[in-house]
Every structure is written in C-alpha cells, then in structure tokens.
Amino acid sequence: MVEAKPNGVSLKEHFETILALNDRFLSERDRRYTEVNIEREKALTIKEEADRRALELAREIQAFRDEKANGLLDLVKSERGSLATNKDIEPLKAFVNAQTGRGIGQSALAGWLVSLVTIGIALAVYARH
C-alpha cells in the first residue's frame, strides 16, 4: 500500500497529477503547433498571391515598355526619310567652303589696305615736320 507523505499527497496521486499536467502540456503544445502550421499556411498563401501579382505587374510594365519602344522605333523609321544625308548637303558644304575662302582673301586685302593707308599718313605727318 502507498503511504501518505508528510505533505498529505500519496505517490499515486502525485503521479496522476504529473500525468494530468503532462497531458495538458502535450495538448497545449499540439494546439500551438497546429496554430503555427495554420498561420504558416496563411503566410504561404499570402506570399504566393504577392508573387503572382508581382509577376502580373512585371508583365504589364514590360508590355508598356515594349509599346513605348515600338512607338519610338516607328517614329525613328518615319523620320528617317526626311533627314538630310551627306550626299544631300554636299552643295551646301561647297558653298560654305567657297564663302569661307573668299572671306579670308577679302580680310587679307583689307589688312594690306589699312597698312598702306597708315604708312601714307605717317609719311605725310613726317613730311610736314
């Protein structure tokens, strides 16, 4: 037979209490594990939805960029025929080069004339004295 201990609890009662507390502990642990798993599944669902939406948004952005790039490409292609080429501006280059050479020659002639007039004035002033 089981004898009473000084605090008044028998060994059998003590073990039954420990087993009951252990059952409560295990039940609580199982409940928490279940709750954590449920929350993990919710988080995974949210992550999957976020990933799906991010992919959709990335597709929309890429489609927008492609559309803008195609529009710019069409604009460049349409303007390509209206731009002047080197062959088109050869006469203009020849005219500018001719005018530039002519201007240099005229400037040199004007410089010589100014020099001659200055020498003439200097001689006239020297001859008076």
Image: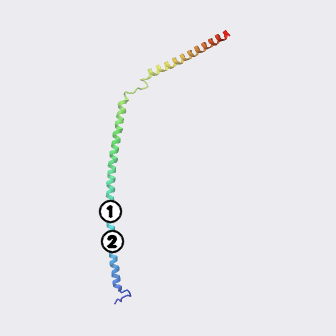
Characterize the local packing of mark 1: few (<14), some (14-19) or many (20 or more) Cα atoms within 10 angstroms: few
Rendering coords of residue 46 (x, y %):
32, 57
**Residue on which disc 2 sits:** 28
SS type, badge 2: helix
Q: In the depicted view, which residue is nearer to us: 27 or 122?
A: 122
Q: Residue at x 35, y 39 (%)?
A: 68
Q: In the depicted view, which residue is nearer to us: 52 or 100?
A: 100
Q: Quadrant of residue 63?
A: top left
SS type, badge 1: helix
Q: Residue at x 33, y 48 (%)?
A: 57
Q: Residue at x 64, y 13 (%)?
A: 122
Are the residues tagged 1 and 2 within 8 Å (C-beta)?
no
Q: Quadrant of residue 114?
A: top right
**Residue on which disc 1 sits:** 39
Q: Residue at x 33, y 64 (%)?
A: 37
Across the whole image, how many numbered discs are drawn on residues?
2
Q: Which labelled disc corresponds to residue 119? A: none
Q: Residue furthest front?
A: 129
Q: Quadrant of residue 121?
A: top right
Position of 57 relative to 106 (above/below): below
The amino acid on which the numbered mark 1 sits, given as a three-letter code, is Glu
Q: Residue furthest right?
A: 129
Task: Locate the C terminus and report the quarter of the image it occupies.
Answer: top right
Rendering coords of residue 118 (x, y %):
61, 14
